[in-house]
Amino acid sequence: MKATVFLGAGRITGALAAGLRLAEHGRKTDGHKKDKRTIVAYDRHPEKLRALRRESRVEMARDLKSAVERAEMLIVAVRPRSVKKMLAQVVESGAAPPRLCISLAAGVPLRNLQAWLGPPARWIRAMPSPVCRIGRGLTALCFDRDVSKADRARVQKFFEHVGPVLELREEQMNAITAAYSPSHGYHALAGLAAAAQSAGLDHETALIAAAHALADGIEYWRRSGQNLDELLHEAATPGGTAAATMAAMDKSGYARAVAAGIRAGIRQARRNAGL
């Protein structure tokens, strides 16, 4: 039986597999007929495969060649600097790759993927957020121009099982990689909670307050349909506490610090890909 095959059983594979299992991917019905899709993973570290199987019930491939030969859709989920070596091993194995191949490696361009594996592979770059583990991950996609309309729809539907999907131009992929990471939220939560604790709140109360400010405030933006200027005006009344807080943060260089972080993330994506 053909399968969706992951090469690499690290964190992002674990998050995707968990999200797909949560969404009951592959166990949806069409009338009275079940459409069972198998997820297979290969990794040179058996302990990673065993952990993945325990968590998400994926099948373990015995070797690279057998994994690739089962693939109807091949997902390369290794570190950016390991992609070239992994694809060389696929070629050396003698296994014929499927038409549909997806890279989750930040910064590695389509032209390199095409050159390293060769035909008949048609490539898609995908950047799924780790939050896909709970079905709320955002995934950015960009497509090789030779990917068919049907395959584009299929890949989009696959990632929609674990959250919303955006299709971007390839030159935008590094920017979204730096901007969409949930680490921004965790970093802001930790910083805001620490500041609140320094101001006199206990640790638990500081975290509750900071989480409300970030998570519930953003959820209200999502649901209200208001733009950010309207919400800032509503929440930060001139002369009030919130307005004074925001003004002091801006004066201290908040916007510049965030912009510098995005630029650093883009540079790192390029370095990680060896570019």
Image (cartoon, rainbow, N blue to C red):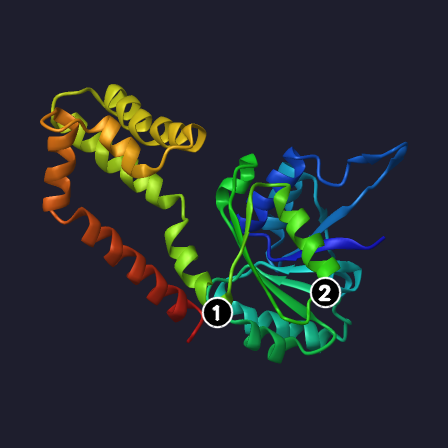
Work out how far the residue at label 1 is from the one at label 2, CA to CA, in angstroms: 28 Å
Residue under the point 68% across and 58% down = 152
In the rendered image, is residue 73 in sight?
no
Q: Quadrant of the C terminus?
A: bottom left
Q: x, y (%) of residue 123?
A: 64, 67
**Near-viewer residue (59 or 146):** 146
Q: Residues within 10 Å of mark 1 (few under 14, many from 20)?
A: some
Residue 172 in which image quadrant:
bottom left
- Quick one: 91 or 156, which is closer to the camera? 156
Mark 2 falls on what kind of element?
loop
Q: Secondary structure at mark 1?
A: helix
Task: Report the amino acid beneath label 1.
Answer: Arg
Residue 253 vs 238, above or below: the answer is: below
Left or right for 237, reference 93 = left
**Residue at x 40% of width, y 64% of height:** 269
Q: Is residue 254 visible?
A: yes
Residue at figure coordinates x 20%, y 52% from the top left: 257
Look at label 2 and name its amino acid. Answer: Ser
Depth check, mark 1 against mark 2: the one in front is 2
Residue 254, percent from left and from top:
18, 47
| Disc with the residue nearer the chain's start (1 vs 2) | 1
For the residue pair 212 and 94, the one nearer the viewer reads as 212
Labelled disc at residue 81 = 1
Number of other residues with Cα within 10 Å of mark 2, as a class: few under 14, some 14 to 19, many 20 or more:
few
Number of numbered callouts drawn: 2
State which quadrant residue 202 falls in: top left
Task: Determine whether 16 is above or below 105 in the image.
Answer: above
Report x, y in % for residue 153.
69, 54
Residue 87 point in image, percent of width and height:
63, 72
Which of the labelled discs sits on residue 148, or is there none? 2
Left or right, 235 with reference to 199: right
